[in-house]
Amino acid sequence: LFIVVSCQPKKTSEQKSAVVKSETAAEVITKEKIRDIRKGLPPVKEVVNLINTSGAPYLAGMTVEDMDPGTLLTRTEKAKAMGYVSFDLLYTKTYNQLESFNKLLTLYETLAKELGFEELMQSMKQFKTDYEQKKGNKAEVDALVDDMLVKVRKLMYNAGSAKDLSMVFVGSVAKSLNIISYQILFAPQSKDGLMAVLQQQKTAVDGVCQVLAGTPGDSDLARYLEMLTPLNKIFQSTEPFNNLTIEQINKLSEAIIK
């Protein structure tokens, strides 16, 4: 009896360990691919700065600051939300929308908690404390946000699964397309500059499609690949963008972030 009782858990443990090692090896490959692709893309901060320097005005109502995290029922939805909340954070900070920025910080912290990213959640709490102390000094806040972005990338890479990182990537890219296309439609005075910024998202759209296509067998990722494929066709086409193209990009990207 002693032999049976003591040895059986060990066998189960070894089996679980083997499965974990197999899954981890597969995820590491995908996560490395995500990191390699993202290294070749302009940072989100740079994209938001380009939107601002194009002369585009801040458009209220474009962020998800009033989103209820309780409506996000799956881990996939929550990870995707982290992607577009991170974009919105930079968007509102760049345009100095402090109330919106603070709401988004709280939302980001909540999502980190619900996804089980304890270290990231603690890091966000510390960031909020530091931010409250320095928010009157733009230079210090900029440095603080830059430091936070570096930490978030590292913590997400370490704590998140390959699927988590894929969905954060999906959310971030879809949100950038949605905001830029919306601004082109409703801020015509900045059309040329914003159009150039939008066209630069070509590599990001193709990159996120590569990531999703490289993870076969996952129904969630397959669904978002299907949604992103028409967008990728638009961006990879040699046809110049026009008003109809922008409306299509806006509609397709909005469907992804809903």
Image (tube, rainbow, N blue to C red):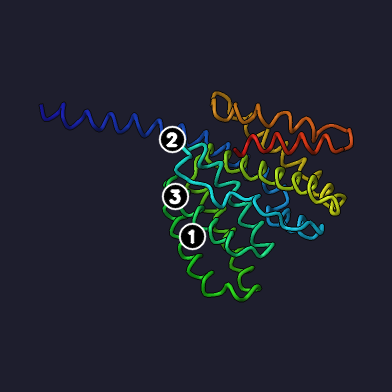
Q: Give the residue displayed 58% in from the left and 49% down from the top.
A: 64
Cα gap from disc 3 to disc 2, whole angstroms: 21 Å
Which quarter shows the N terminus? Answer: top left
Quadrant of image for the C terminus = top right
Q: In this view, does 155 lie above or below 227?
A: below
Looking at the rendered structure, the kind of residue marked 3 is Phe
Residue 239 placement (x, y as % from top left): 89, 33
Q: Which mark is residue 21?
A: 2
- Determine the residue positioned at 76% across, 55% down: 51
Amino acid at circle 2: Lys
Q: Do callouts 3 and 2 mark residues in contact (Cβ within 8 Å)?
A: no
Give amino acid for label 1: Met
Residue 211, horizontal then vertical, whole percent: 64, 35
> Residue 241's spot in the image, x, y percent?
86, 38
Which residue in the protein does label 3 denote?
117
Q: Distance between the residues labelled 1 and 2?
A: 30 Å
Residue 12 sits in quarter: top left
Give the CA distance from mark 1 to mark 3. 11 Å
Q: Mark 1 points at which residue?
A: 124
Pointer 3: residues within 10 angstroms few (<14), some, or many (20+)?
A: some
In the displayed structure, does residue 124 sit left or right of residue 230? Answer: left
Observer-side mark, 1 or 2, equals 1
Crowdedness of circle 2 by 10 Å Cα count: few (<14), some, many (20+)?
Answer: few
Residue positioned most to the left? 1
SS type, badge 1: helix
* Badge 1 or badge 2: first in the primary sequence: 2
> On the rendered structure, is 125 left or right of 13?
right
